[in-house]
Amino acid sequence: MISDFDATSAAWSKSTHSGPDGGTCVEWAPAHASATGAVPIRDSKAPDGPVLMVSATAFAGLVTMAKRAQL
């Protein structure tokens, strides 16, 4: 568990697959992921909401699954 992560000061990056109309919006914090190996993910429509922390391997799997679902 990572207790020192501060979601309010993290640099979030919106997925390139998120729609501009506020539909499916997912963000992640790449700098934190690079520094720790834990990837923070959140719903950009709810920035004060919960943050899901996953391993880099799990994140890669989520990205792969999302890309396949778009086919």
Image (cartoon, grey):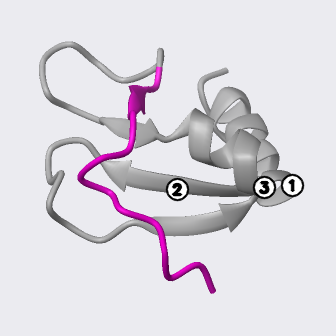
Q: Could you classify mark 1 by the number of other residues whose Cα lies within 10 Å: few (under 14), some (14-19), or many (20 or more)?
A: few
Image quarter in which the C terminus is found? top right
Q: Is residue 50 above or below residue 38?
A: below
The residue tagged 1 is: 57
Nearer-N-terminus badge (1/3): 3
Residue type at mark 1 is Thr
C-alpha span from label 1 to label 3? 9 Å
Dot label at residue 40: 2
Which image quarter: residue 25?
A: top left
Judged from the image, the secondary structure of the residue bearing numbered disc 1 is: helix
Q: Nearer the viewer, mark 1 or mark 2?
A: 2
Would you say 28 lies left or right of 54 here?
left
Q: Residue at x 47, y 53 (%)?
A: 41
Q: Is residue 39 above or below residue 69?
A: below
Judged from the image, the secondary structure of the residue bearing numbered disc 2 is: strand
Dot label at residue 7: none
Would you say 28 lies left or right of 50 here?
right
Q: Is residue 62 visible?
A: no
Q: Residue at x 32, y 57 (%)?
A: 7
Q: Residue 9's x, y, as percent?
A: 29, 47
C-alpha span from label 3 to label 2? 10 Å
Dot label at residue 37: 3
Residue type at mark 2 is Pro
